[in-house]
């Protein structure tokens, strides 16, 4: 409560002469000086206010011009989803987690892109070409350097040409990216991806879709990283030395989850700073990886299991683990994963439903987009190709997503996750952790020869005992010459 004294108006004291201040008694002849009010006295009292008002008047036209020059700052109708989408995607890169275009180049063109038959600027059949990527306002793409599981392999240790084919896929992906420098920028870091977007290019990164493509070898993982690959899908539609695939479980086999070598694979992926992709793996493999990884993980193209109970999708308990892990689930556009009962009826709205559930359970900070364009044969109505991303964004906004949430979904999340993984890798390496040397316990190793110059006595004794044979003698006989040689 205020006091009475504070409520009384204060008495103004007139300015006195020095003699009065010194305590001299006033007389009738004493001179008392009263200050005269100046006509400009109000200016002193209101000077700050006047200056502020004048400054505001001066800069008003500049502010107005700035709003006109920077339309992103001006308010818009929140129901104008097309304009909101345009503004978001002009300032945030839309990065798709999975597109199989390099695989089509392999299958259809046998990796030949210089003979004039391949022109990505043309309107092609299928889902992907440059014109439609621009129409879709794309800012980045993880290109899958995919090779299918080898049906001839009865066991993942059986000989196969898959690793060779994978190297060729990496090669052709880099070459087609380099052929269109005005469109694509090849990137190996999130910093590069952001810079490419700012320069009006589509950042292009590489991902390997399955551990079978590296022969289950952790040493091959390191070489893939050195070649620029930045994520590995732990399994595709076949088991490997690391883990169990969803396809194996779908065929009625037990879900064995991650193997002991798989745990070593996770450690090496963490140390390298390579993203671990859990799309295609079994549900137990998901849980096993999340229980031991030191870095966030990604699902490059998966849906929500609670919406569609397909084993390729992510269960809610795993989504909650993703929230704690800091990872991301990138929503897939594959019809069968979106609606198992009637895939032909799938529309863009089904994708919205899956994204919404992923965001509700894991959080908007942990969801992205991973279409599987150019790989899946069938796509939802309304999401026929790479030009349709803005339509998806508009529907999410109509459902209630904010611009900030859309920025996370479009690209900010995957870039943040990638940065986090690289940062943790630098910490692990700084701690002195060495590259992983574990191998699959059932692996068979090549032998040397009986008389090779071995380093250790034990090896020499074993080579003699087991009679490891001799190197090729080039058909040199006892006479000191080659045997019968056919002339060309």
Image (cartoon, grey):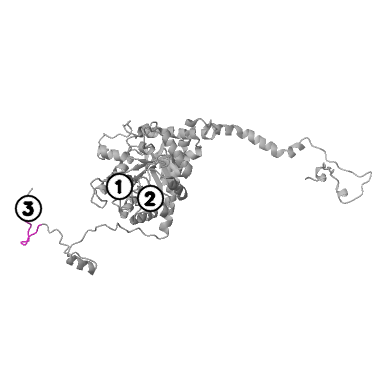
Picture quarter containing residue 308?
top left
Nearest-to-viewer mark from 1 and 2: 2
Q: Of callouts 3 and 1, which one flags the residue occurring earlier in the amino acid sequence?
A: 1
Label 1 residue SS: loop
Nearest-to-viewer mark from 3 and 2: 2
Q: Nearer the viewer, residue 331 or 75?
A: 331
* Residue labelled with disc 1: 238
Label 2 residue SS: helix
Asked if the magenta segment contains residue 478, the reply would be: yes
Q: Of callouts 1 and 2, which one flags the residue occurring earlier in the amino acid sequence?
A: 1
Q: Decide: marks 1, 2 in contact (CB < 8 A)?
A: no
Q: Is residue 275 visible?
A: no
Q: Decide: marks 3, 2 in contact (CB < 8 A)?
A: no
Q: Specify whether 443 is left or right of 283.
A: left
Which span of residues is magenta-colored? 475-485
Q: CA distance from mark 3 to mark 2?
A: 60 Å
- Mark 3 is surrounded, within 10 Å at the Cα level, by few (under 14), some (14 to 19) or many (20 or more) other residues, namely few
Label 3 residue SS: loop
Q: Residue at x 26, y 47 (%)?
A: 162
Q: Nearer the viewer, residue 327 or 470?
A: 327
Q: Where in the figure is residue 4, as x and y percent of width and height?
A: 82, 44
Q: CA distance from mark 3 to mark 1?
A: 47 Å
* Residue labelled with disc 3: 485
Q: CA distance from mark 1 to mark 2?
A: 15 Å
* Residue labelled with disc 2: 284
Q: Where in the figure is residue 135, as x and y percent of width and height?
A: 40, 32
- Mark 2 is surrounded, within 10 Å at the Cα level, by few (under 14), some (14 to 19) or many (20 or more) other residues, namely some
Q: Is residue 73 visible?
A: yes
């Amino acid at each position: 409560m205020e006091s009475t004294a504070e409520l009384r108006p204060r008495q103004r004291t007139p300015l006195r002469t020095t003699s009065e201040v010194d305590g001299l008694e006033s007389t009738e002849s004493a001179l008392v000086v009263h200050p005269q009010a100046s006509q400009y006295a109000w200016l002193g009292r209101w000077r700050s206010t006047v200056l502020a008002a004048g400054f505001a008047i001066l800069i008003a036209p500049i502010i107005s011009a700035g709003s006109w020059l920077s339309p992103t700052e001006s308010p818009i109708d929140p129901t104008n989803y097309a304009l909101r989408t345009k503004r978001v995607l002009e300032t945030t890169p839309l990065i798709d987690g999975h597109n199989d275009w390099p695989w089509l180049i392999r299958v259809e063109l046998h990796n030949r892109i210089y003979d004039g038959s391949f022109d990505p600027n043309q309107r092609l059949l299928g889902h992907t070409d440059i014109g439609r990527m621009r129409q879709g306002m794309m800012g980045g793409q993880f290109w899958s350097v995919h090779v299918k599981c080898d049906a001839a392999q009865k066991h993942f240790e059986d000989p196969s040409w898959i690793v060779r084919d994978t190297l060729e896929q990496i090669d052709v992906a880099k070459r087609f990216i380099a052929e269109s420098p005005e469109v694509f920028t090849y990137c190996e870091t999130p910093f590069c991806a952001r810079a490419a977007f700012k320069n009006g290019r589509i950042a292009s990164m590489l991902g390997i879709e399955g551990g079978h493509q590296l022969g289950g070898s952790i040493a091959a993982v390191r070489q893939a990283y050195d070649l620029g690959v930045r994520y590995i899908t732990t399994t595709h539609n076949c088991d490997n030395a690391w883990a169990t695939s969803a396809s194996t479980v779908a065929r009625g086999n037990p879900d064995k989850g991650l193997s002991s070598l798989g745990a070593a694979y996770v450690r090496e992926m963490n140390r390298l700073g390579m993203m671990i992709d859990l799309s295609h793996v079994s549900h137990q493999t998901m849980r096993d990886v999340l229980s031991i990884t030191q870095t966030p993980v990604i699902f490059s193209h998966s849906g929500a299991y609670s919406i569609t109970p397909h084993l390729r999708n992510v269960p809610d308990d795993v989504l909650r683990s993703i929230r704690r892990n800091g990872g991301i689930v990138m929503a897939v556009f594959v019809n069968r994963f979106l609606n198992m009962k009637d895939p032909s009826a799938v529309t863009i709205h089904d994708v919205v439903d899956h994204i919404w559930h992923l965001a509700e359970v894991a959080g908007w900070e942990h969801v992205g987009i991973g279409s599987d364009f150019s790989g899946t044969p069938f796509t939802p109505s309304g999401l026929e190709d790479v030009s349709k991303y803005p339509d998806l964004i508009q529907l999410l906004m109509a459902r209630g997503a904010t611009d900030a949430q859309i920025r996370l979904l479009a690209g900010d999340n995957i870039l943040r996750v990638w940065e986090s993984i690289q940062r943790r890798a630098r910490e692990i390496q700084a701690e002195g952790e060495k590259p992983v040397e574990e191998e699959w316990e059932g692996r068979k190793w090549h032998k040397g020869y009986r008389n090779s110059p071995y380093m250790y006595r034990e090896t020499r004794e074993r080579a003699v005992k087991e009679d490891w044979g001799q190197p090729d003698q080039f058909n040199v006989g006892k006479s000191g010459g080659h045997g019968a040689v056919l002339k060309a």
